[in-house]
Image (tube, helix red, strand yellow):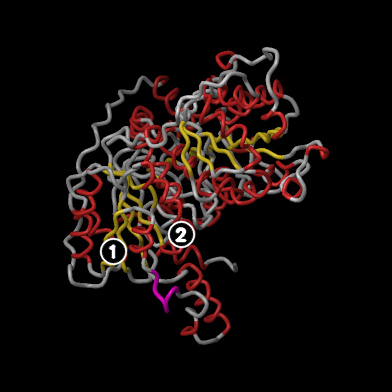
């Protein structure tokens, strides 16, 4: 399956003479290797937009037109989850940056690379149009997102703008990865280039190699592992590489280490492996909690909130923390979590350390078997209402025989109901838990997965879909196929759980928990919304049997190169670990 965004909008060839500042900016985007640029148009970068169309012919990079700036960033986020590479994003002035800011925070918390370009101005007040240029011009525009971007710049000349683009690209790609932001002056874009200005050569500005552990650190880690009787590996943010996946298995098997995984991050270890202490969940579930509490050595491989989770389960074993995440800590965002007390801290990427240990120990690494068609789940009670357990079983049955990637899963999902056997089997959550990100991330991930044999499938909550639903239009426009199952429980159920806890604590009527939470009266017709944007749609389906048939129909539609939405009415409920984790604290 191959989507071709650059074949949708082919401009008339430009035969004009002359070169403008934005022409060189567009050429730099191409030279930096960006294949796509996600944007919602705006006058602050009208010069750059013209250059992308008329100088580059809307190819390499090709535009992905989005209906909201937050969708543009979310699409780039989904792309990075699959490829590990940044997509270019352009956001209009201060207003577009404000619209996109929640999605930028998600990308920051998820530690994915992304290069965001914006514009302001004219910086020179004499060149501003009345009214509109004044309200769309800000001093230090990047200050709005500086706490959750890795680097930013607001260059004042063409040469400085080109240099900033190169630097932003290098920094975004350098571990630990995160978004960068460059804000152009509209005047610089629209100035005619008279002389041939200096331009940085991208091949001389490559991201450095990932840092490696010292020999002493590897010796210490090996000694600790050799001495450990009950080691546990916490596999967090790791790569989508099949080779890295195989190395993780080899190291765990060498030391008979139990492995804990996290549903907030992508598939990191086969969940049907005997050493996997599952299920993966948003909060530590019962079995992995016991494994961690019993461990005499814990090795955390860039785990999200190591200190918090170990405190939750009462773990007392020695900790080895393998992570570069401390380099992104700042005083505004607390996404760096509590600082773990570690016997050894190795400042390197997990897969770098694991592969070095595999070579050091001369371990045999079994090549990962290509993804096999998924077997059917447990038999469904086809006429029942769709519970979360029945939802999982129906998905497994309806998608049986297909190689799929679960792009996203809802908060109520039971991580033990579905096995991940390949690094692309599951891509993880959104980082910052910003509702509304799911549809855009699905579009971006599906675009990246068109170069594979996989079917991108996302199971998204109805609240998440409704906030970001217009992101789906971009998929319809550019022929990006996927299957989206709306997990429609007709409620902001996350907060119903919280309201129930508050009511019980205060001795008040639990029956009132749905007031101000339920999305009913009128119910939302997701199929109609999908069709209105040019997507195929099925539903509403109300039983597991109907969902199985809908999925089989959806596969046929997917094979035709079309995105399809299934509106599935499910029971409002959460997996046990999720409900307990949400309500254990006071907030």
At label 1, counting other C-alpha atoms closer than 10 Å, the crowd grade (few under 14, some 14-19, many 20 or more) is some
Per the image, the residue denoted by label 2 is: 464
The residue located at (23%, 59%) in the rendering is 393
The reply to whether discs 1 and 2 touch (Cβ–Cβ < 8 Å) is: no
The answer to which image quadrant residue 168 occupies is: top right
Q: Is residue 420 above or below residue 395?
A: above
The residue located at (34%, 42%) in the rendering is 479
Per the image, the residue denoted by label 1 is: 389
Q: What percent of the width, then of the height, locates residue 490?
A: 40, 71
Q: Secondary structure at mark 1?
A: helix
Magenta stretch: give its range.
519-524
Q: What percent of the width, then of the height, locates residue 209?
A: 54, 20
- The answer to whether 20 appears left or right of 415 in the picture is right
Q: Secondary structure at mark 2?
A: helix
Q: Nearer the viewer, residue 569 or 95?
A: 95
Magenta span contains residue 23: no
- The answer to whether 451 appears left or right of 468 in the picture is left
Say whether disc 1 or disc 2 marks the residue closer to the N-terminus.
1
Q: Is residue 411 above or below residue 223?
A: below
């Amino acid at each position: 399956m191959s989507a071709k965004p650059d074949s949708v909008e082919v401009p008339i060839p430009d035969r004009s003479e002359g070169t403008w500042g934005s022409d060189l900016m567009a050429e730099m985007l191409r030279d930096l290797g960006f294949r796509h640029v996600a944007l919602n148009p705006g006058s602050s970068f009208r010069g750059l937009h013209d250059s992308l169309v008329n100088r580059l012919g809307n190819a390499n990079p090709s535009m992905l037109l989005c209906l909201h700036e937050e969708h543009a960033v979310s699409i780039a986020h989904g792309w990075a989850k699959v490829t590990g590479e940044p997509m270019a994003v352009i956001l209009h002035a201060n207003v577009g940056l404000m619209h996109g800011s929640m999605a930028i925070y998600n990308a920051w918390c998820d530690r994915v690379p992304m290069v965001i370009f914006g514009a302001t101005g004219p910086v020179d007040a004499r060149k501003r149009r009345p009214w509109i240029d004044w309200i769309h011009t800000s001093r230090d525009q990047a200050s709005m997102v500086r706490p959750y971007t890795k680097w930013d710049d607001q260059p004042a000349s063409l040469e400085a703008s080109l240099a900033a683009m190169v630097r932003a690209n290098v920094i975004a790609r350098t571990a630990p990865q995160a978004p960068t932001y460059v804000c152009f002056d509209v005047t610089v874009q629209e100035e005619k280039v008279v002389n041939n200005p200096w331009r940085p050569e991208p091949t001389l500005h490559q991201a450095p190699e990932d840092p490696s552990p010292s020999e002493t650190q590897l010796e210490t880690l090996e000694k600790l592992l050799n001495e450990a009787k009950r080691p546990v590996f916490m596999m967090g943010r790791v790569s989508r590489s099949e080779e890295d996946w195989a190395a993780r298995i080899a190291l765990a098997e060498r030391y008979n280490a139990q492995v804990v995984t996290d549903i907030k991050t992508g598939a990191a270890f086969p969940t049907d492996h005997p050493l996997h202490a599952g299920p993966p969940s948003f909060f530590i579930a019962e079995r992995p909690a016991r494994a961690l509490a019993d461990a005499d050595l814990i090795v955390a491989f860039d785990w999200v909130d190591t200190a918090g989770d170990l405190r939750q389960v009462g773990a007392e074993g020695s900790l080895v923390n393998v992570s570069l995440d401390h380099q992104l800590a700042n005083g505004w965002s607390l996404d760096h979590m509590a600082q773990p007390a570690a016997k050894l801290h190795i400042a390197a990427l997990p897969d770098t350390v694991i592969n070095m240990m595999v070579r050091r120990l001369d371990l045999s690494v079994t090549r990962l078997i290509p993804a096999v068609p998924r077997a059917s789940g447990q038999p469904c009670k086809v006429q029942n209402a769709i519970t979360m357990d029945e939802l999982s079983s129906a998905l497994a049955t309806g998608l049986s025989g297909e190689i799929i990637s679960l792009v996203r899963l809802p908060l109520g999902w039971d991580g033990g109901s579905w096995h991940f056997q390949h690094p692309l089997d599951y891509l993880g959550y959104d980082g910052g838990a910003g509702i509304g990100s799911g549809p855009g991330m699905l579009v971006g991930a599906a675009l990246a997965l068109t170069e594979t044999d996989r079917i991108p499938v996302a199971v998204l909550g109805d609240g998440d879909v409704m906030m970001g639903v217009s992101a789906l239009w971009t998929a319809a426009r550019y022929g990006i196929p996927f299957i989206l199952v709306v997990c429609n429980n007709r409620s902001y159920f996350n907060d119903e759980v919280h309201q129930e806890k508050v009511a019980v604590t205060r001795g008040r009527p639990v029956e009132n928990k749905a007031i101000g939470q339920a999305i009913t009266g009128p119910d939302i017709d997701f199929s109609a919304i999908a069709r209105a944007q040019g997507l195929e749609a099925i539903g509403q389906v109300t039983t597991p049997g109907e969902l199985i048939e809908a999925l089989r129909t959806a596969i046929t539609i997917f094979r035709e190169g079309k995105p399809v939405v299934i509106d599935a009415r499910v029971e409002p409920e959460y997996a046990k670990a999720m409900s307990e984790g949400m309500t254990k604290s006071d907030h």
